[in-house]
Amino acid sequence: MPATSPQGGPGRFARAPGCAGAGAATLGATPAWRWVAVRLGVVAPVTDRAVHSRPVPYLGGLAMLSGFLAAFGVAWGFGGFGGGMSGGGGAGGNF
């Protein structure tokens, strides 16, 4: 199956390495950021109004950011941003 669509853009599977990289990076970064949050005390404490029974780390968003940056890096490495907005690919550019 070709990697390009009939219109000449990225095909159905062209973004798979970036998605796999994002998932793997997020999965790997989550325990690391959890450890950092617990170590630094950046946790939601248990209170009378809290649903959780033990402190919950706050830095999960940084794990997701790590996954996004990994996907961005993989896409950059595979040339996924070739042309960009100035590539003449219409209103959206060549992504």
Image (spheres, helix red, strand yellow):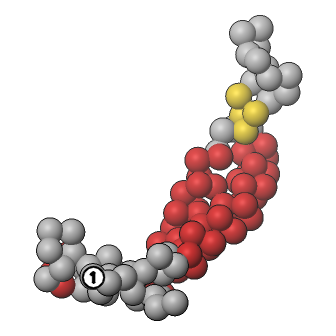
> Quick check: 55 left or right of 43?
right
> Quick check: 13 left or right of 80?
right
Amino acid identity at mark 1: Gln
Q: Locate the C terminus by quadrant.
A: bottom left
Residue 90 position in % (x across, y down): 14, 74
Residue drawn 39% across and 87% down? 4
Out of 20 and 2, give the one closest to the viewer: 2
Q: Does 59 sit above or below residue 24?
A: above
Out of 50 and 4, give the one closest to the viewer: 4
Is residue 77 visible in the rendered structure shown here?
yes
Looking at this view, name the residue that lies furthest to the top: 48
Residue drawn 71% across and 28% down? 44
Out of 29 and 91, give the one closest to the viewer: 91
Residue 25 position in % (x across, y down): 66, 67
Looking at this view, name the residue that lies furthest to the bottom: 2
Is residue 73 visible in the rendered structure shown here?
no
Please give the residue where the numbered disc 1 appears in the rendered image. Answer: 7
> Quick check: 50 left or right of 88?
right
Q: How many numbered marks are there?
A: 1
Residue 43 position in % (x across, y down): 72, 34
